[in-house]
Amino acid sequence: MGAMTEPSPWWSRAVFYQVYPRSFRDSDGDGVGDLDGVTAGLDYLVELGVDALWLNPVTVSPMADHGYDVADPRDIDPLFGGIEAMDRLIAAAHERDIRITMDLVPNHTSSQHPWFQAALAAGPGSAQRERYLFRDGTGPDGLLPPNNWISIFGGPAWTRIVEPDGRPGQWYLHLFDPEQPDLNWENPEVFEDLEKTLRFWLDRGVDGFRIDVAHGMSKPPDLPDMQIAENRMLADMDSDPRFNHEGVHDIHRNIRSVLDDYPGAVAVGEVWVYDNAAFAAYLRPDELHLGFNFRLVRAEFDAEEIRDAIENSLAAVALENATPTWTLSNHDVEREVTRYGGGALGLARAKAMALVMLALPGVVFVYNGEELGLPNVDLPDEVLQDPVWERSDRTERGRDGCRVPMPWRGDAPPFGFSTTADTWLPMPPDWAALTVERQLADPESTLHFFRRALRLRRQRGGGSALTGLSAEGGVLTLRTASGLTCVLNAGERPVELPTGEVLLASTALAGGQLPPGAAAWMV
Ligand code: NOJ
């Protein structure tokens, strides 16, 4: 008798919907979205056809980086409704067969975390300082930082503190904002605490985690200087001593051993590592279940580039026989409608790319508002909140433009997102045309298109393996084991569709031709 095959885990072909909780729906009228708002939106998400949510951070935080600066990882911030709101969301989602995954931020804490406050108070050489990366400065009187590392948000990755006796003192490392001190993962207390956090949420019913900066955490002990090149979120980080240090894999093994106590729990890592073998190392059977692959986000609207991105992502996961993941946008990058050229052109291409993504094998992540075709918003200087703006001396506008709240209904801001017009980021008046209400009333809307695509994906065994992938003359063609053909026209001229039945197209088709910037699913 052959070996029994394990049933596939629930997430192996899942569609995750990424909720940026500040921006999904506000239930209490303070202008910031919250967890009861997410609960109120669950039926909308059922209709959309998603399997699971990824919630950006909702734990207690001073919000210097909108929750990625965690002051208490085992409680929910009152801004989002407190822990009871999380319990309500978990219960309501599970009633609807929707899984809940949370963001987990193990690389750093908030500077307001009691551990960091204790480290500041306790002084150099103390056990409290050993939980973070404190070092003496270099140069006369320690005036210079311990090495040349720069923060991902701009400026030095080190900040000098004032010691309890009032004198200028040690420096601490923060790969992101100064309010996000990096933890010292050599200290066993750090994992012990993370284990408590994992079990706390898993015991409450959470189905898994998205792991922030999963290629971070471990640092080379001597903290060697980095080569200063372009320092951007999307930069090539493969030879960067700040990231992807080999010690990180033990951390993932330890996390996995906790998750394995909870059948079905999943971990998806944010892994900005481009070398295929190095990326795949995170997906070994005793490490992460899934890793975000950002190649599609980085690809231009070009058939060859998209094919290469797909081939590359598949080749990377194949090294470990792991499941691929796909995403076109998230809370850190410009929305794809804008990336692909903006306006009608950008929207048409974004819809076409959605058909490509939803035809691919494995797991898909849709970012809230993607289903409405929201573009990035050009926000005025005075409302910008992303720490990137100030840290870059106002040269980088940051990520607020892709985080503007969702328009639900009505003709003017706040479009049913909140009861106050004073939303945490202003909503453009011309989003009146993009509200959920307006799109539900229009069978040709982007929202209906996404609903149809997700329904068909589910009905037709979507997420199955590719049997063909080609790019020729600006046309990308995918064939799946479930019998679907997806054709994308990224060229300049209309192209003939292959013979067959069109199941769904991203635009109206005339005379069996696929216009430029469009895609179709065929059988
Ligand atoms: C990656 C997150 O996606 C981003 O939003 C955050 O600013 C950094 N990690 C720091 O936690």
Image (tube, helix red, strand yellow):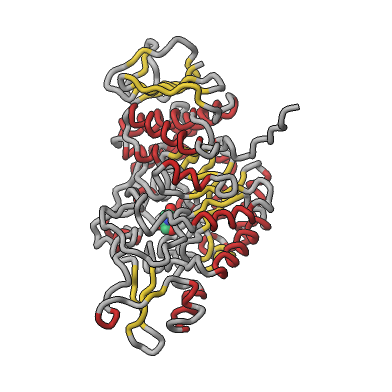
The image shows residue 461 at horizontal and vertical percentages of 59, 26
Horizontal side of residue 91 vs 235, given as left or right: right
Is 175 located above or below residue 163 in the figure? Answer: above
Is 272 located above or below residue 322 in the figure? Answer: below
Residue 36 falls in image quadrant: bottom right
The image shows residue 202 at horizontal and vertical percentages of 65, 55
The residue lying furthest to the right in this view is 1
User: Which residue does the image show at 55% across and 40% down from the upper left?
Assistant: 44
Horizontal side of residue 85 vs 397, given as left or right: right
Horizontal side of residue 517 vs 441, given as left or right: left
Residue 97 visible: yes
Nearest the viewer among 170 and 22 is 170
The image shows residue 315 at horizontal and vertical percentages of 46, 34
Residue 487 falls in image quadrant: top left
| Figure quadrant, ligand 1 | bottom left
Residue 448 visible: no
